[in-house]
Image (tube, rainbow, N blue to C red):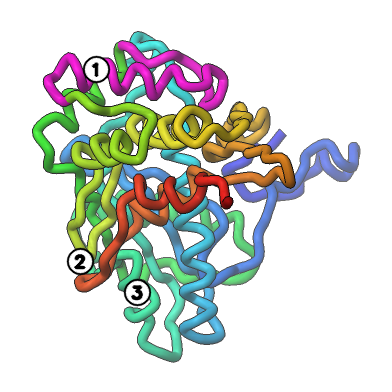
Amino acid sequence: MADDDESFIPGPLDELIPGLRQKAERFPALPIHARVVHAQTGAGERSIVLASFAPAANLRALHAALKRVVEATMLATLSSPHEAPAAESASDEGRLAALELYVFAQHPFDIRPALAPFALFEAPLDDGDAHRACALLRREARHVDGSVPEDAVARYRAALARPQHPLAEPLERALREHAPSGAWGSHPGALARACADQLERLGHGGVEPTPRGIERLEEVLIQGTPGAIRWLEPLCFQALCDLLAVTAAVHFGREVEWGVCEPDEETKLSPPPLIRVVTKRESFHVPLGEHVLRWCVMPRAQAEEIPSLGAWAEHEFREES
């Protein structure tokens, strides 16, 4: 059977036994390709790489297409289940350093205003990292219907800015050792508890299931750098989501059901953190992962004021009288 990464070329066996080989899945050429690749950098890190193989109808359509793919990709990365330290180190592919977009089609308008909200800015096409990424994308182009140019015409890059608090990295390392293994939601509250315990050990107390306790965790993890992707390591992202869920249950007295975010058997991707809140009058789902991504990770504008997650929890979970 043909490899999934190769185009299908019929041969004599296919005439003798129709259907012996299946054609690899193909996608229409889209303004933002539906699949992403991960490229290694010369510094031993990696980038999430997106491609634009066809021009968009207009600026708004390009922004909408990019938003869907960027948010889905970020959430899939941030929601990956925690593994035991030995297994985790064996599969480590290097620290995530950037999000990149390679444009293969000429657009009839200036695309930069659609990219700026994602902190994607022009970058050189003639360095080693770009060459490695383009080689992967040429291979990916085999999955695209229609003619795709051999070479990209532009490259845009968004570097990931990480928390500057001195306890952010020690916390992430400690969680790798002490967090419960498995998908988010399989041990309700355990990840938030482990996070609070490790920060207490590191001298940063007060992380508890209250709006103020959420803000104490935000002090370590959330940064206000404008015009940048404000990256959180997956375990820290998931701990923040778990603390929000525990706060809804403990502080605000809501009945909360954690969604168990097991990876899909086919794609191996995990759904983002999600809870179901039950009240006397109704039940509703709260997409915690999506909310924390947009509130705390995606770029903020220079003059944008963003309330704390603790304030959001107060608004979201307090029972109306």
Q: Residue at x 23, y 65 (%)?
A: 227
Query: Which residue is tagged 1?
Result: 198
Mark 1 vs 2, N-terminal side = 2
State the residue position of label 3.
Answer: 153
CA distance for labels 1 and 2: 41 Å
Region rendered in magenta: 178-204
Q: Secondary structure at mark 1?
A: helix
Report the residue at 74% width, 46% height from top.
281
Label 2: how many Cα within 10 Å (few below 14, some 14–19, many 20+): few
Find the distance from the CA under tag 3 to the CA under tag 2.
10 Å
State which quadrant residue 83 falls in. top left
Residue beneath disc 2:
124
**Could you tell me the amino acid type at mark 1?**
Gln
Q: Position of residue 291 (x, y in %)?
A: 47, 51
* First in residue order: circle 1 vs circle 3: 3
Q: Is residue 183 found inside the magenta-colored segment of the image?
A: yes
Q: Mark number for residue 228? A: none
